[in-house]
Amino acid sequence: MLNQNQTPLLDALKANAARPHAPFYTPGHKKGEGISQPLTDLLGKAVFRADLTELADLDNLFAPQGVIQEAQQLAAEAFGASQTWFLVNGSTCGVEAAILATCGTGDKIILPRNVHSSAIAGLILSGAIPIFLNPEYDPVLDIAHSITPHAVESALQQHPDAKAVLTVYPTYYGVCGNLNAIAHITHQYNIPLLVDEAHGAHFAFHPELPTPALAAGADLTVQSIHKVLGAMTQASMLHIQGNRIDSDRISKALQLVQSTSPSYLLLASLDAARQQMALQGKMLMSRTLQLAEEARTRISEIPGLSVLKMPRLGKSPGFLALDKTRLTVTVSGLGLTGFEADEILDEKFAVTAEFASLQHLTSIISLGNTPADIEQLVQGFTTLAKEYRRTNLTVKSHLWQDLFTTQCHALCCSPREAFFAVSEILPLIQTNKHICAEIVCPYPPGIPVLMPGEVITKSVLDYLQQIQAKGGFISGCNDTSLKTLKVVKKRPNS
């Protein structure tokens, strides 16, 4: 057992920030002396004194032998891994590295169609061929959940040469599928299970939260420590266990997708967040769960609103557990879209949610929230229901299902091939039946509706236009106004 009271990286950074010396190294602001006054007024000087580079006492992220190595070992023990890497480019680089470390050009990887755009970037970088699975779907709420063990087993039977399975656990809505069963099936083929656990870093610290991915049998998991715990934005971790993944390939892949000038502020925040959770995690999560339960109970009693909860008829393969710190409120009963409700709550009541969708508004309740926050959230929804209610909103409930049922089977070439193909930009109305050459996704949550290599269909164009018309934001593509799309003009070697 390691001493989880320790913060080796944080301590070293603090000591170096306080050491009087003449700095003749990067960064150029020289411990804050060169920072503009407006930025100093906002943040103070202390943060810039700690904005240091790879000094001798601070170790090297890509070849750690000192305080970074010690901090990562402490994190591995706290989160239940055999080895942990600190990430300064967010979970995005972790997901990309996971695919790069397990798949090469032409290798197959099984994954859900509702993956984050980082997984698509991993496909483009690696040249891997995606075998997409449709996640389980709730047609009433228009919410996609997790892929099922049966779907994974069927895919592996059809593609026994697949090199890995990747899944999302939990989803952006906090839904967890049957990861234990998926891990068991995947391991029967002696291939690794990769997990995008960006929103589940807190699972290891309270028994009332869903089972952590590693405890459920995952070989690799990527966690955004900044999303739900106390690290700074962009600070994440990658964990592995077992022997199905070559740790050296992970290290080499991370060198391709991480900055060679990592922020020690971000790295130290990971060290501090780990210590906080190792020592106080259960208490902090108990308090967080209590706040979330209060919000869930009170909001569910407001006429016209409902909250996402476990299925009435019991657990399903794609919805085995729910992260109760994730609060999804269905607002369509008020005659409002989630985008409209989000705008009203933000502008009128200073309540800002994590993301909106056509029918829902989703909030993250974390260790940083207070009882006052919950009261403001509840009062905001109470007033929203009383003063902004309109006639019922009509939304095509099976729109998402129709969209991805067709899209999952419309990949004409690999994402990498389409991404690097000769392309052209066409007016949106002329792109039907063309091959997409860019990533197009409403953001958040960053789930691509189109990706390079997929055939553009009328259903996907209708979906994107409806999202935009209702107030959603389209990202990833060259023209976010959605007047044009980039399509493949000429495929390589054709």
Image: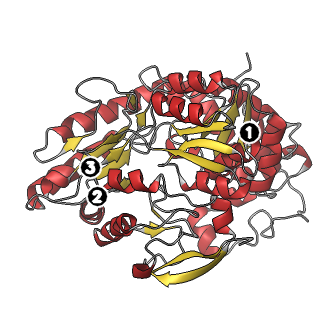
Work out whether mark 1 precedes mark 2 in sequence or the reverse, and give the earlier one: 1
Work out whether mark 2 precedes mark 3 in sequence or the reverse, and give the earlier one: 2
| Residue hosting label 1 | 85
| Residue hosting label 2 | 358
The x, y position of residue 279, in whole percent, is 59, 24
The answer to whether any part of residue 250 appears in the image is: yes
Q: How many marks?
A: 3
| Residue hosting label 3 | 376
Q: Compared to 422, does 355 lie above or below?
A: above
Q: Compared to 6, does 335 lie above or below?
A: below
Q: In the visual, does 360 lie left or right of 383? A: right
Q: In the visual, does 450 lie left or right of 26? A: left
Q: Considering depth in this image, is 305 or 12 the residue closer to the camera?
A: 305
Q: Quadrant of the C terminus?
A: bottom right
Work out whether mark 1 precedes mark 3 in sequence or the reverse, and give the earlier one: 1
Q: Amino acid at mark 3?
A: Gln
Q: Considering depth in this image, is 143 or 373 the residue closer to the camera?
A: 143
Label 2 Cα neighbours within 10 Å, binned few <14 / some 14-19 / many ≥20? many
Q: Compared to 171, does 456 lie above or below?
A: below
User: Label 2 to label 3, Cα distance in Å?
Assistant: 23 Å
User: Between tags 1 and 3, which lies in front?
Assistant: 1
